Amino acid sequence: QVQLVESGGGLVQTGDSLTLSCTASGRTFLGWFRRAPGKEREFVAAIRLSTGWTYCADSVKGRFTISGDNAKNTVYLQMNSLKPEDTAVYYCAADPKGVVTNPRGYNYWGQGTQVTVSS
């Protein structure tokens, strides 16, 4: 059974940084999504741990960095210069089929971790 375990969410202030972690049992192609209140799930970033390939959404490029540890099957999302509009539940997902930005293509999801950015 595939398990995705996220950690690192919390309450921060505008401009602060936060790092999310996700450990995925046996999965090496992982993505981060987020869902803000009243909005649809939004792609944030993806990584293929075996090759180091990464891709970030334009909305977070330059502020967020995805990285990973292949040996530990763990992916990180370093979030800098956080804004109130980054407030959302952040989800880790694994094994995308098709376009990595499409949440419907992912078979496995974590439980989510709340990130709240106060102004």
Image (tube, grey):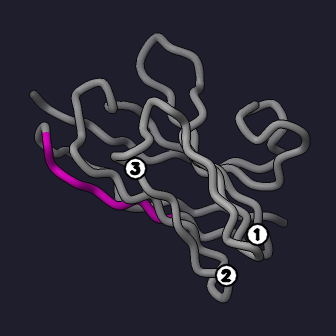
Q: CA distance from mark 1 to mark 3?
A: 20 Å
**In-front residue for pair 41/16:** 16
Q: What secondary structure is marked by label 3?
A: strand
Residue 18 in the image: state x and y as whole percent. 28, 56
**In-front residue for pair 26/102:** 102
Q: Is residue 86 magenta?
A: no
Q: CA distance from mark 1 to mark 2?
A: 7 Å
**Residue that numbered label 2 is attached to:** 70
Is residue 110 among what the camera can see?
no
Residue at coordinates 59% horizontally, 25% vertically from top-left? 41
Hey, which quadrant is residue 86 in on the image?
top left
Residue 12 in the image: state x and y as whole percent. 16, 45
Residue 110 in the image: state x and y as whole percent. 62, 51
For badge 1, the amino acid type reads Thr
Residue at coordinates 69% horizontally, 57% vertically from top-left? 30
Q: Which mark is residue 64?
A: 3
Residue at coordinates 44% horizontally, 47% vertically from top-left? 113
Is residue 91 among what the camera can see?
yes
Q: From what the image shows, is residue 105 above or below residue 119?
A: below
